[in-house]
Image: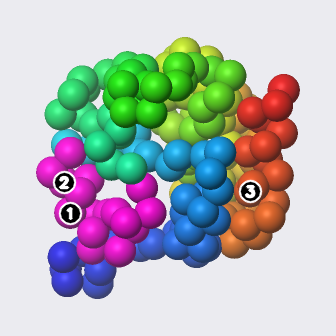
């Protein structure tokens, strides 16, 4: 985990964004990732992010190698845990890659907030079909507004 902290990169604003989302009673942050669950847990723990996420309700490559399928897996786990049906009307994907956008689009038409973190440009995220594109996670209020607007539309 020291190696991860040294060589990995935490997106600016990630901790504040997760803290804000976790602090809301109407939102439940989890993870959908192309990483195996064990690797995802190591990465999240290395940056102290695991405590902000309901990792039990996540979707991981160890569940299915087809990333869009992980959205439904995570939704079913969350439904079993919270007794609420999760679908495209009350789920949002937040990601910074074209793969993240595709995962939302192909994973039940879940709206996507693209973060133009530097790996993928805002224009590329928009062209791929992100519903909203933010420059970063640093403006927590902007992120919360985008989530609320996507969930109410």
Question: From mark 1 to mark 3, how far is it between C-alphas?
Answer: 26 Å
Identify residue for label 1: 42
Identify residue for label 2: 39
- Which residue is at the front of the view, 65 or 26? 26
Q: Secondary structure at mark 3?
A: helix
Q: Which residues are magenta?
A: 37-53
| 64 horizontally vs 116: left or right | left
- Which quarter shows the C terminus? top right
Circle 3 crowding by C-alpha within 10 Å: few under 14, some 14–19, many from 20: many
Identify residue for label 3: 143
- Which quarter shows the N terminus? bottom left
With respect to residue 108, does 138 lie above or below?
below
| 55 horizontally vs 91: left or right | left
| Of labels 3 and 2, the one closer to you | 3
- Which residue is at the front of the view, 133 or 88? 88
Circle 1 crowding by C-alpha within 10 Å: few under 14, some 14–19, many from 20: some
Q: Total number of numbered labels? A: 3
Residue sitting at x 57%, y 38%: 93
Residue 128 in the image, given as x and y percentages of width and height: 66, 30
Question: From mark 2 to mark 1, how far is it between C-alphas?
Answer: 5 Å
With respect to residue 97, does 52 lie above or below?
below
Residue sitting at x 45%, y 33%: 82
Q: Are marks 2 and 1 in contact (CB under 8 Å)?
A: yes
Q: Are marks 1 and 3 in contact (CB under 8 Å)?
A: no
Task: Check residue 1 in the rendering and tell me which mark sits there, or answer none.
Answer: none
Residue sitting at x 42%, y 55%: 53
Magenta stretch, main secondary structure class: helix
Closer to the chain start, of discs 3 and 2, is: 2
Closer to the chain start, of discs 1 and 3, is: 1
Specify the farthest residue to the front.
83
Residue 118 in the image, given as x and y percentages of width and height: 60, 62
């Amino acid at each position: 985990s020291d190696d991860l902290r040294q060589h990995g990169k935490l997106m600016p604003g990630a901790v504040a964004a997760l803290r804000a989302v976790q602090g809301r009673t109407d939102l439940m942050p989890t993870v959908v990732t192309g990483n195996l669950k064990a690797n995802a847990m190591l990465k999240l723990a290395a940056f102290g992010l695991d405590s902000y996420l309901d990792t039990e309700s996540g979707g991981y490559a160890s569940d299915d190698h087809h990333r869009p399928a992980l959205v439904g897996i995570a939704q079913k786990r969350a439904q079993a845990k919270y007794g609420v049906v999760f679908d495209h009307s009350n789920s949002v994907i937040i990601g910074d890659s074209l793969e993240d956008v595709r995962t939302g689009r192909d994973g039940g038409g879940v709206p996507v907030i693209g973060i133009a973190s530097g790996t993928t440009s805002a224009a590329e995220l928009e062209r791929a079909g992100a519903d909203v594109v933010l420059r970063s996670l640093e403006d927590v209020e902007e992120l919360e507004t985008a989530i609320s607007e996507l969930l109410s539309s």
